[in-house]
Image (tube, helix red, strand yellow):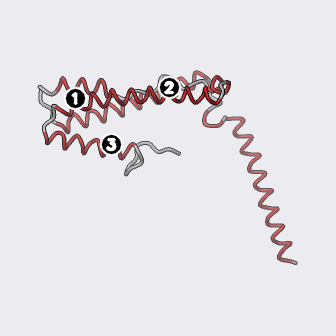
Amino acid sequence: MNTIRKTLLVGMAVLSLGAVGNAARAEDSTAHGRHGQALTEEQRAAKAAEHKAKFSAMVAQHQAKLHDALKLTAAQEPAWATFVAAATPQLPAARPDRAALAQLSAPERMEKRLELHKQMLAQHETRLAALKTFYAVLTPEQKKTFDEQARQHHGRMHGGHGAMMRHG
């Protein structure tokens, strides 16, 4: 009987601590917003501009590293420029308005998502065409270097060793 009482007391203590912790977290979430939702439009715009600048710098750095590793000839430079112009990834202009999406029906939201996926697919097809055109002008040694660089870059972007982007 004594053990049951102790167990109940410990259980109640844990539950009460959990309730206090949840109340404190609720206060924090209303004051600061979840995932930065309490930011003003100006703060969001500044954050987006900062993110876009970092993204552009990272892409430029990767392209410069690849360019140097390939040791392109003067004859290959125009193909490189065309490839970079077509293959440079673009950040989306803006996120869809959550309030507007919430007003849509489930099929309408799914149609919006499908539209976005079609746009992304079109971008991937454009990049693939540019890649094939550029890849065709490379020597076998350059192709080997390009493949290795692409493999290393893809591993970092998708959770490989030294991942550049981690999804929480």
* First in sequence: mark 2 vs mark 1: 2
* Mark 3 or mark 2, whichever is nearer to me: 2
| Classed neighbour count for the residue bearing mark 3: other residues with Cα under 10 Å, few (<14), some (14–19), many (≥20) | some
- Distance from Cα at disc 1 to Cα at disc 3: 20 Å
- Distance from Cα at disc 3 to Cα at disc 2: 28 Å
Q: Which residue is mark 2?
A: 115
Q: Which residue is mark 3?
A: 153
Q: Amino acid at mark 1?
A: Thr
Q: From the viewer's perspective, is residue 10 above or below residue 102?
A: below
Percent position of residue 62, x then y: 30, 36
Residue 133's disc number: 1
Foreground residue among 163 and 118: 118
Percent position of residue 142, x then y: 16, 39
Residue 57's disc number: none
Q: Amino acid at mark 2?
A: Glu
| Classed neighbour count for the residue bearing mark 1: other residues with Cα under 10 Å, few (<14), some (14–19), many (≥20) | some
Q: Secondary structure at mark 3?
A: helix
| Classed neighbour count for the residue bearing mark 2: other residues with Cα under 10 Å, few (<14), some (14–19), many (≥20) | few
Q: Viewed as shown, does residue 140 lie left or right of 7?
A: left
Residues tagged 3 and 2 counted as in contact (Cβ below 8 A): no
